Image (cartoon, rainbow, N blue to C red):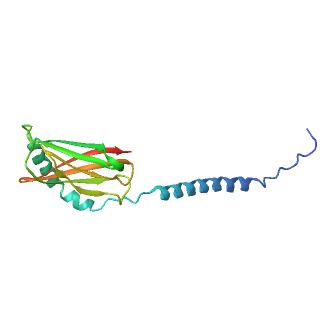
Amino acid sequence: MTGRPRPQRSLTWGPWVFFAMFAVVLAANGALVVFAFGSWTGLETRGAYEKGLAYNDTLAAARKQAALDWRVGITLAPGDDGRVRLEATFRDGSGRPPRLTAVTARLVRPTHSGHDLVLPLAKLENGRYGTETIFPLPGQWDVRVRAEHAGGSYQATRRVVVE
């Protein structure tokens, strides 16, 4: 077959497609970097090595606390003017209120640093301790109650949602 020679096709658009694909990848990576830095809360773990070294002490304290066989109830109730009523109720293994020297509550926002609060809880009656406070932000909070007694301390934690 003889015939006319076929015209030679020019591939001048080939390099542009190659560079366009890289531009799309770079733009996507750049957007992910911007979103990552914009959403980072700044929380970091401090003292992890020291906490690891003290892990056996932490386990011993947990066994000692479990041997007390205490029951702790942590409740939150809406109060006046946007305040929240925080109460902790303590009972020993026989159902009586234990003799405590001091009770504090640490309110920790697990997703944002800088909003934590430490509040002393006043003795009310019959093993109940409480206070009123205003949470700085709505959302999830960890309420960590620590009770001091003659034999050491007792800790209880409850995650709550504040609206």
Name the one closer to the observer, 117 or 123: 123
Q: Residue at 25% of width from left, 61% of height from top? A: 49
Numbered-mark total: 0
For the N terminus, the image quarter is: top right
Image point (21%, 50%), residue name: 145
On the rendered structure, is 158 left or right of 89? right
Q: Position of residue 62 (x, y in %)?
A: 15, 48
Q: Residue furthest front?
A: 80
Q: Is residue 108 left or right of residue 50?
A: right
Q: Is residue 31 left or right of residue 138?
A: right
Residue, far right:
3
Above or below 23: residue 139: above
Foreground of the two, 155 or 127: 127
- Toward which corner of the image does residue 3 lie, by quadrant? top right
Q: Note whether 42 is above or below 63 in the view shown.
A: below
- Percent across and percent down for residue 63 are 12, 46
The C terminus is located in which quarter?
A: top left
Relative side of 94 to 49, left or right: left
Camera-nearest residue between 11 and 141: 141
Q: Which x, y percent locates residue 2?
A: 93, 40
What residue lies at 18% left-to-right and 58% top-to-bottom?
Answer: 54
**Percent x, y of residue 115:** 35, 58
